[in-house]
Image (tube, grey):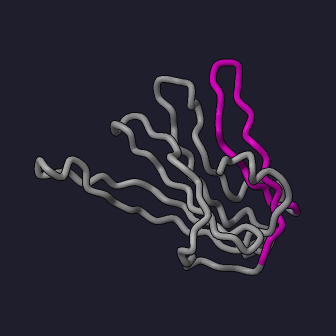
Amino acid sequence: MELKDLVGEHELSGVDSITEEKKEFEPFGGCTLEFQVIRFVLDGKTYKATEDPADGYRACMEEIEVTDEKITNNFPPQKVIGKMKPGDNFNDNDTIQFRDVVTGEIVLEVGTDYYDDWYPMCIMYWNPENLAINIGR
């Protein structure tokens, strides 16, 4: 699945961010890599975006997939619009931004900024304060 498949109007009803880890180079004693994961529910379907930590200096989003994993932070469905984040004159992005329909603010952003640069940057941003349901709280 590609991020651009999520462009358009949706109902966002859950988001959580966790850290996962995996062992690398197991035959030689291995090391443990930690990486960010953000899961979110759009239109009743749960998606999982996973960071690829690469070499510690570079990071990009590894994949996005549909999952059956349970979300711990659920809320009443909120209308959001997903749009791909534009690049600039020097670098391109493969990042989607979800904006609350009422506030117009970014509430969720996932992907890779500067994916064509020497130092790509994994973006996993969740800002619940920008949801209309949280105005005045």
- Does the magenta run of residues contain 64? no
Q: Position of residue 93 (x, y in %)?
A: 65, 34
Q: What secondary structure is the magenta-colored segment mainly?
A: strand
Residue 40 drawn above or below residue 3: below
Tell which residue pokes out farthest to the right in this image. Answer: 102
Tell which residue pokes out farthest to the left in this image. Answer: 28
Q: How many marks?
A: 0
Q: Is residue 105 left or right of residue 126?
A: right
Q: Position of residue 86 (x, y in %)?
A: 74, 34
Q: Position of residue 40 (x, y in %)?
A: 63, 66
- Does the magenta run of residues contain 98? yes
Residues 65 and 58: in front is 65
Report the magenta residues as a range. Answer: 77-101
Q: Is residue 94 left or right of residue 17?
A: right
Residue at 57%, 74% (x, y): give it.
Answer: 68
Residue at 80%, 71% (x, y): give it.
Answer: 78
Residue 82 drawn above or below residue 90: below
Residue at 77%, 70% (x, y): give it.
Answer: 43
Q: Position of residue 55 (x, y in %)?
A: 34, 36
